[in-house]
Image: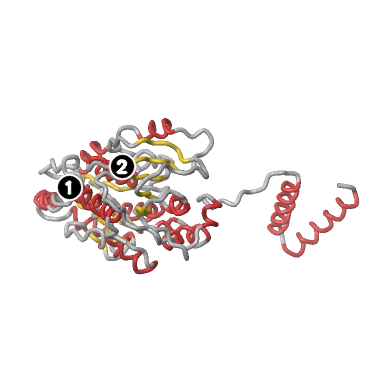
Amino acid sequence: MNSKKIVRKVKIAKNLLRDEGVLAVGIRSLEFIQKNTRKGSSKRLKVDTSAIYSEVLAADPSLPANKNWKSLENSKKSLTMNWLMPPPGKGSGGHMTIYRFIEYLEKAGHTCRIYFHNPGPGSSVEAVQTIMGTSFPPVKAETKWLQTHEEMADADALFATSWQTAYTVYSSGVTAKKFYFVQDFEPYFYPVGGMSILAENTYKLGLRGITAGGWLETKLHDDYGMATSSFDFGADSDLYKHTNDGDRKEIAFYARPTTARRAFELGIMTLDVFHKMHPEYTINFIGWDVSEYDIPFPHKNLGILDPEELSELYNKSAASLVMSLTNMSLLPLELLSSGCIPVVNDGPNNRLVSNNPFIAYSKDSDPISLAKELSKVVEMKNLPTYAKKASASVKGNSWDESGAKFVKMVTESVNTDGLK
């Protein structure tokens, strides 16, 4: 920059300082630096659509995915099904359900393949499986990454399991019945904007919906005209057992600060109020490592626990705070099975999934109302007896029953078009 330009810039800065103050000078200086940094760089920001860009562009709601699907001429006892999913992380409840149902399909004599979606540089199946550990149901399914623009192997059915994978399944040239395994209303994962619309648009592509619970079944059918059926949530009573008939002096909180729909901030404030009401109760945080957060009351940061460890904790706990602002969490029935009373924010997104009378629904979702609901549970007379009854109330909520229903829905849809 020559001397004349420098003099001019200084003069402009002085005038700006005089007329608009120090903050305006700072903002203008930052804009100048950013502008000149961009000029000197050959890199451009990529438009991030999360899903594969070309597949989003090709998705046409006027041409529904299963429009020309006809049931198989000869019903097959053994079907082949491709599952497309984001790679699982440790403790992922959504992936746990997917793998559980793949296992049910395999036990019924069907063949499944698993494709991990949209790999990044250096991605490997082995690395993902190492992270998964042994906490997921064991399946026989062959597993591989589906490279961008690669086609899946021939199959009788394709399953999308997230909104990003829905675009890939819709675009697939494989002649198969195309399903959408929906476990949550994913537009709510984003602020109102382009990403929420891209997620919402997948419900208009004509994929056959199978949903986790009645809220999603109703919402996707009524709001988007999607063909839907649902399965019920289950609880593994062999794993989550009621083993404590005595007093319970602890509280569990499903703390997921990285998952907005679990309302971490609201939970903290609720437990702050509760702790002042009942300082004698130990408060346990589960689901994530919260060591970086300044929590204003005594607590134990337990992070991600194995199912056996969770069952042990639930049996020490009188109640658990579980915030579910979209579709209901899997936790409430597992908690009940262990005799721990879940305190949950009320709403059709939760009630239409489970209206179990032992779930303590809080009508209002402010910290004081939620804390009072927790307090009602711990102050309950003869809580050990109530906990035992709560556990008995979910004995009929078996994953085996849900799995059998799921297998029947899928095979009927493919073979007889019984589920359009």
Query: Which amino acid, mark 1?
Result: Ser
Residue 345 position (above or below residue 154): below
Q: Nearer the viewer, mark 1 or mark 2?
A: 2
Residue 112 position (above or below residue 369): above
Name the residue nearer the viewer: 174 or 183: 174
- Residue indicated by mark 2: 99
Quarter of the picture containing the C terminus is bottom left
Q: Residue furthest bottom?
A: 222
Image point 16% across, 48% down: which residue?
A: 339
Q: Secondary structure at mark 1?
A: helix
Q: Residues within 10 Å of mark 2 (few under 14, many from 20)?
A: some
Image point 68% across, 57% down: which residue?
A: 23
Image point 48% across, 53% down: which residue?
A: 171
User: Residue 271 location in percent, x, y?
Assistant: 31, 52
User: Residue 392 location in percent, x, y?
Assistant: 11, 50
Residue 150 as seen in the image, left or right of residue 311: right
Residue 58 position (above or below residue 242): below
Name the residue nearer the viewer: 71 or 373: 71
Name the residue nearer the viewer: 70 or 403: 70
- Residue indicated by mark 1: 337
